[in-house]
Amino acid sequence: MTLAAGVWTGTHWTTLANSLGGDASAAASTGAAGSSAAAVPGTAEDPVVTKSYVDQRLAELGLGSGGSGGGTPTATPAPTATPAATATPKPTATPGGGSTDGGSEDDGAIKVINVPAGKTLIAADGAEVVVRAGKAVAYSPDSNGIADVTDGIDIKSGAAVPQNHLILFPRGGRGVSSAPGMKTGLTVMVKGSYEIKMQP
């Protein structure tokens, strides 16, 4: 509560200073007459006050309460224009075999998707995946695995991927699929670009 009053007071400092005599030094010395750098918080020289006291004093000064946002409004700076991000092209087919059943561009949102049995979710560079349901195994076309950030380990291709663990794909081309012999697919949360392909 005190922090909120302090933040409000800080954002309306000019208005407070003007109402107390026109300069910031008058506002700084109010309530702590004769205070010095050696004053101890909570003493008579530097009292600790409650939000209700601050609100009361502000109301007496005609500045409204700490939570109302009264007083002179301050201008909010307009956001600066940023160059539009280049869109990642939607994956369509992967060289070296395997058709693409679907995928997603990276829009920064977390998507909940189903990966059917017999298919593999192939993540793009920087994608994040959390397996929510089903028995998943890691897929990597080379000897490198995928990063289990939750446990701080590297999961090699073919090894089980635990549910509810954050899996990070610093390089694309790796993914997760249903464990061999599973008739049900996976439910996963994905952040980043991905594609769903037939299992290699």
Image: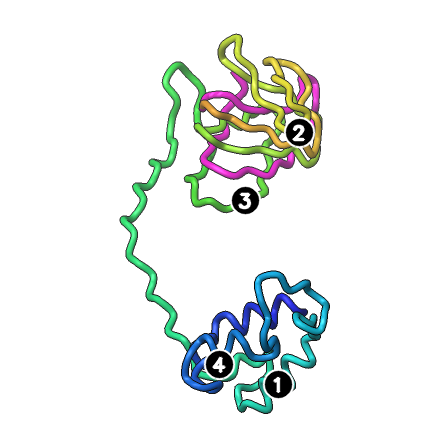
Residue at 38%, 70% in the rendered image: 76
Q: Secondary structure at mark 3?
A: strand
| CA distance separating discs 4 and 1 | 11 Å
Count residues near mark 4 (Cα–Cα under 10 Å), then give few for <14, some for 14-19, many for 20+. many
The residue that disc 2 covers is 150
- Percent across and percent down for residue 26 are 48, 79
Q: Nearer the viewer, mark 2 or mark 1?
A: 1
Lower position in the chain sequence, tag 4 or tag 1:
4
For the residue marked with disc 1, what is the amino acid?
Answer: Arg
Which residue lies under the disc numbered 1?
Answer: 57
Is label 1 or label 3 in front?
Answer: 1
Numbered label attached to residue 16: 4
> Which of the two discs, 4 and 2, labels the residue nearer the N terminus?
4
Q: CA distance from mark 4 to mark 2?
A: 49 Å
Q: Mark 3 = which residue?
A: 110
Q: Nearer the viewer, residue 128 or 38?
A: 38
x, y percentage for residue 113?
58, 40
Task: Please state the extent of the stretch shown in magenta in the rendering.
Answer: 172-200
Q: Residue at x 42, y 16 (%)?
A: 97
Q: Nearer the viewer, residue 117 or 16?
A: 16
Q: Quadrant of the N terminus?
A: bottom right
Q: Quadrant of residue 184?
A: top right
